[in-house]
Image (spheres, rainbow, N blue to C red):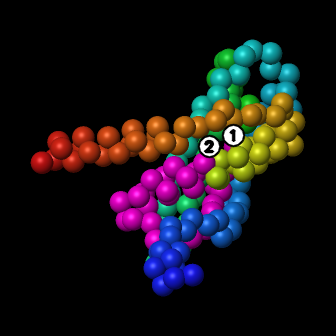
Amino acid sequence: MSENEQAAKAEAPIFHVVKLYLKDLSFESPNAPESFSVESEPKAEFNLDTKATQKDDDHYEVSLEVNVKVASGDGKILFMAEVSYGGLFMVKNVPSEHIPMVLGIDCPNILFPYVRQVISSVVLEGGYKPMVLDPINFAALFHHAQQQKAAQQGEKA
């Protein structure tokens, strides 16, 4: 291998999952067992947030936090589930302008199936039908957040 090939290989972008882990989990079913016999169509509220923290030069922790609240038609809470799932990622030799996209799109896309599984399992263990979360378009969410940020900065100028 020539020196140029070795240098190019050494500078190639690296994206690596170091560790995936459940950071926090909460499940509440405040009206059980009465809530198991609710016949009205339940209403679900869903909130999602991502957080990224640089741990050292090449390592970032990304957390995906999901809150789900399901209520009966008359507003009684059936259950609430809160999950924070984290990942430690190595991001090396990636242009600095691309790192926010890696952390805001690629990492959450890796974490989301684990969050979905945890929520489905805990809801089932809580005595309810498993809840399957729909796929999330993290690219669209990221670009929308960037547009909002740019608009807010434009208003301040």
Number of labelled discs?
Answer: 2
Is 148 left, or right, of 25 in this rendering?
A: left
* Residue 147, position as x, y percentages in the image: 32, 40
* Quadrant of the drawing holding the N terminus: bottom right
**Mark 1 highlights which residue?**
80
**Region of the chain picked out in magenta, as a range:** 81-109
* Structural distance between the alpha carbons of marks 2 and 1: 7 Å
What residue lies at 39% left-to-right and 38% top-to-bottom? 144
Contact flag, marks 2 and 1 (Cβ < 8 Å): yes
Name the quadrant containing residue 128.
Answer: top right
Q: Amino acid at mark 1?
A: Met
Q: Is residue 123 left or right of residue 62?
A: right
Instruction: Work out whether residue 141 can be spotted.
Output: yes
Q: Is residue 94 magenta?
A: yes
101 up-or-down from 74: above or below: below
Estimate the x, y position of residue 82 in percent, counting from the top left. Answer: 66, 47
The picture places residue 98, in percent across and down from the top left corner, at 41, 58
